[in-house]
Image (cartoon, coloured by chain):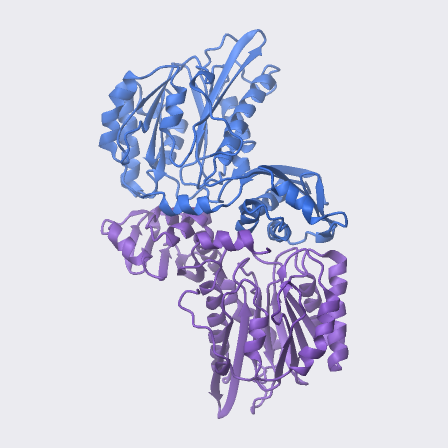
Chain colours: A purple, B blue
Amino acid sequence: MPVNYTPPTPESLLPVAGVELGTAAAGIKKWTRDDVVLIALAEGARAAGVFTQNRFCAAPVIVCREHLAQAGATRALLINAGNANAGTGEPGLSDARTTCAAVAQTLGCAAQEVLPFSTGVIMEPLPVDRIVAALPAARAALSPTNWHAAVRAIMTTDSVPKAASRRIDVGGAQVTITGMAKGAGMIAPNMATMLGFVATDAPIAAPLLHALAIEIADESFNRVTIDGDTSTNDSFVLIATGKASLAPIASAGDSRLAAVRAALDSVAQELAQAIVRDGEGATKFITIVVEGGRDVDECNRVARAIANSPLVKTAFFASDPNLGRIVCAIGNGAAADLDPAHVSFWLDDTLVVQDGGRAASYREEHGQRALAKAEIVVRVALGRGSARTTVWTCDLSHEYVSINADYRS
Amino acid sequence: MPVNYTPPTPESLLPVAGVELGTAAAGIKKWTRDDVVLIALAEGARAAGVFTQNRFCAAPVIVCREHLAQAGATRALLINAGNANAGTGEPGLSDARTTCAAVAQTLGCAAQEVLPFSTGVIMEPLPVDRIVAALPAARAALSPTNWHAAVRAIMTTDSVPKAASRRIDVGGAQVTITGMAKGAGMIAPNMATMLGFVATDAPIAAPLLHALAIEIADESFNRVTIDGDTSTNDSFVLIATGKASLAPIASAGDSRLAAVRAALDSVAQELAQAIVRDGEGATKFITIVVEGGRDVDECNRVARAIANSPLVKTAFFASDPNLGRIVCAIGNGAAADLDPAHVSFWLDDTLVVQDGGRAASYREEHGQRALAKAEIVVRVALGRGSARTTVWTCDLSHEYVSINADYRS
């Protein structure tokens, strides 16, 4: 069960004009559920993507990058669950291209206008024939109201579907945003998450859309970590169909952008946090704020050292205020010249460490009280600058080991 | 139970001339066992140490560094288990100095000739009074034959004592080496392990001893990782009493050094591997060899990305050849310009990935057979240079979570 996350109802997910979704069952694994999603975009739609920094990036990630660079427009996305098409070498690349060509033929567009995405087991050959055979059914199912079916079809170890919508007024015109994401393990996105898609009908010009995709990912999916393993397939795509009734937004200085940006950030952050709340085996949702750093990079390294420490994560799972483990993690993440004598940290509102040592006011029962909750904030002050960052993570439980010891079987 | 490690018998641990050990019960935690070790060194003994790179290093580490820099000789070591005296700020430093002064008074030497070591819970005040009160008993117990009692007294979550001896012939003279180590969690030493002590009666001059300590740690304790958390207290000390009947060894070019060095390496590596074999919850001992790198640093980053990946570790625990997780970890540890098309890896003698994709000869049952064993070798070829490294690690089991969810209680 995810930590304080209520999955979306089908009705809560608003259609975005210019976006149609269809799902089908290709039988990629031994399951009978739908596992392929076809997304068709109206003419004129633009997409921007950010992708994993893992050097063993998956074949679909390589093809996505190529196609986004080559084509001016994007007309379709094809997503499959159950097989990541990663660590598959040249045959994997060829397989990804074959599926794009098949989608292009099905929808009547260029292969470069199709973006492929895969998620699932690494190092297994993609069952291309079964995916291609499922395309007519997916095409027949295309509908603007299919977001809920789509997000269910891209799940792997996710326990719930993760999606969200917003509707805002921009200068009298209605703008709609709907997004979906999947991922529960191998999550430490670097430039993008496992799979995240956010679509709006706002008419955002292509160069601006690309800058927005990077900025939004950096404030949402790049702020979460479950197990520190950046996946081979991380992809975040921002889609703007331009179907809303307002004039194009082409510059970052456009006064209408603020409202759209805020709504996009809100959807992306809700999805990113939902991934952590549904993290494999998660029983706690932990927000780590590091402030007073010399630069953001320093704050990030400290925040991630805490977030990825198995000792910190197991202490959170046990609700055991063994907070020296946070001290140890700070010391591992910090720059070599950090002076511990200026470091303090808080658990929610309780000062635990002051000036490098245990705070005189700190009592074990304060720590116990904070850790008994399902949502915990750790705030670290490095005491040497004004940079700041936030990272969201979860605990490490027996269930995490069970899930990952059994995942393929 | 440790993986393929038989703990030493008391008789197997050879006395080293010039080294006497005494243990006592200070009641640092709610236990009745001995938890303090006093080691007295004969006049003329030299010690060299390497210590944690964690920026929140413990008070005893700071004092050890000071004393080794200030004093020409080392006459005593004081070790306590149950409390790390880390994250304790200025009071912790003062506490460490108080214990050194008390040892100096007990033995009649200078406080700077005493090295303090602590291991246990972080961020608790050191019970100095109880430790000082235990010193007369520890002094009364001093004996060259007490290595086994000493290594038992420094254990925390260790399930077995870890110690080893060697006796070699150097130009007709007998040289003895005995070492002990502790540590089972918070283990990813960087320059030294949790606590490791190796003593020899060989007469090694001080500057050479210091160089040897660094080199030996780098080939032993710095090659292991259990959970990726470099502790606040890592310390490795190499002691040379000079009591063996041979002329001093002062230069790295001395032909007699090779045999002594080989025996020292052998003890240090056996202890380092014993720490992994006794890693918290370990059921498998995994050797990761990365070769064909541009430099050793690159090989190390890839080896540690594999060794510290919770997904790789849980797959090893489950004996599930979900080897795509190794592909993912390689991609995370590698430099940005690594070409996956030149990467191959083997599980024992089975080629799994060739040129970036699954090897045509690889069958699931090969992976299953390799993973069913308690000792596994992963060998990765990066295909772009001649650098090479080895890292030893263990799997991540339910027991690891249990141990770390319960440790303080």
| Residue in the foreground of this view, choosing between A176 and B338 | A176
Q: Residue at x 23, y 49 (%)?
A: A360
Q: How far from the left and from the top, in percent, is residue A310?
A: 45, 49
B220 lies left or right of A324: right
Drawn side of residue B385 relative to residue B120, left or right: right
| Residue for point 54% across, 76% down | A179
Note whether B77 is above or below A331 in the view shown: above
In this view, A93 is above or below B75? below
Taking the image as shown, residue A225 lies to the left or right of residue A285, namely right
**Residue B297 occupies which quadrant of the picture?**
top right
Task: Say which of B198 and A399 sits in front.
Answer: A399
Report the quarter where the C terminus of chain A lies.
bottom right
Judge from the rendering whether residue B205 lies leftward or rightward of residue B104; answer left or right.
right
**Between B321 and B109, which is closer to the camera in this rendering?**
B321
Residue A340: x %, y % from top left? 37, 46
Instruction: Report the residue at 60% width, 86% height from top.
Output: A242
Q: How many marks?
A: 0
Image quadrant holding the N terminus of chain A, namely: bottom left
In the rendering, at what x and y percent does residue A50 appear?
60, 67
Q: Position of residue A110 (x, y in %)?
A: 76, 78
Front position in the image: B309 or B367? B367
